[in-house]
Image (cartoon, rainbow, N blue to C red):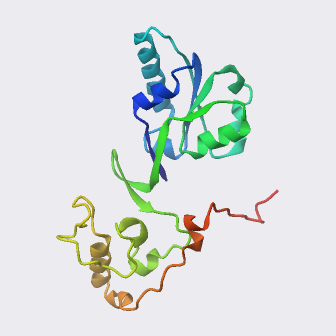
Amino acid sequence: MIVGERKPLDEIIEMIKDAKKILIVGCKGCVTVCNAGGSKEVGILASTLRLARLKDNNPLEVDELTLERQCDPEYIEALDEQVPNYDLILSMACSIGPQFISERFPEAQVYPALNTCFMGGSMEHGIWAEYCQACGDCKVHLFGGYCPIARCSKSLLNGPCGGSADGKCEVDKEIDCVWHLIVTKLMKQGKLNQLTQVKPLKNWTTSRDGGPRKIVREDLKL
């Protein structure tokens, strides 16, 4: 899932300082799962902003709405009659949300309330970690099911680098050395020879380095 976190409150307050009436739009997708932008977080932010503005003797009218998703035009349509009624829209989705809303409503002021962080998974309650960089050419099967591109601090395909200690990365002792995990797993499986073949230079044309990407599924097009 896409993992995000709410922007600092001061930054959001600065964004909306000139508005008198705003709509906060949440998303029931990834950002709900990671407790950043679902209906609960929309309610908390709305209350916080109202109180902050009351404290400054500058009342703010805030309405709340949480869409099924903000990365799908059919759900953005639900805003058609609402957007013109507000000074600005504050999106609590990943950055796709405010962009989709901005494109559908060119006259509207749309601001992001979240910072989109990475694609990751839940480690335990309240902790998420990066697992994927969406390089467009997944090779985790070659590395015991681990991704050295996303999880090695140096993105080495022919690791380990030799700098780790006690299974931890030299860049940050809080980070597990993914190459330690790869080697340990393949040793247990008796497949360490998988690593004896030097991996060729990665083709990055499928990654973000090739510019914005698009997938076209002709079988799904209407």
Q: In the rendered picture of this protein, how many numbered marks are placed on residues?
A: 0
Report whether residue 141 is seen: yes
| Residue 30 percent coordinates (x, y) | 51, 47
Up-down relation of residue 26 to residue 220 (above or below) = above
Q: Is 196 left or right of 118, judged from the image as shown? A: left
The residue at 57%/15% (across/down) is 20
| Residue 125 percent coordinates (x, y) | 33, 46
Question: Residue at the right extreme?
Answer: 222
Question: Residue at the top extreme?
Answer: 57
The residue at 21%/70% (across/down) is 167
The residue at 52%/15% (across/down) is 60
Up-down relation of residue 94 to residue 141 (above or below) = above
Q: Is 21 left or right of 126, judged from the image as shown? A: right
Quadrant location of the C terminus in the rendered image: bottom right
Up-down relation of residue 172 to residue 38 (above or below) = below
Question: Residue at the left extreme?
Answer: 166
Report whether residue 146 is seen: no
| Residue 25 percent coordinates (x, y) | 58, 31
Q: Is 76 left or right of 161, judged from the image as shown? A: right
Q: Quadrant of residue 217?
A: bottom right
Q: In which quarter of the image is residue 154?
A: bottom left
| Residue 43 percent coordinates (x, y) | 48, 25
The residue at 42%/15% (across/down) is 51
Q: In terms of depth relative to the viewer, which is nearer, 61 or 70?
A: 61
Q: In terms of depth relative to the viewer, which is nearer, 16 or 149?
A: 16
Q: In terms of depth relative to the viewer, which is nearer, 48 or 144?
A: 48
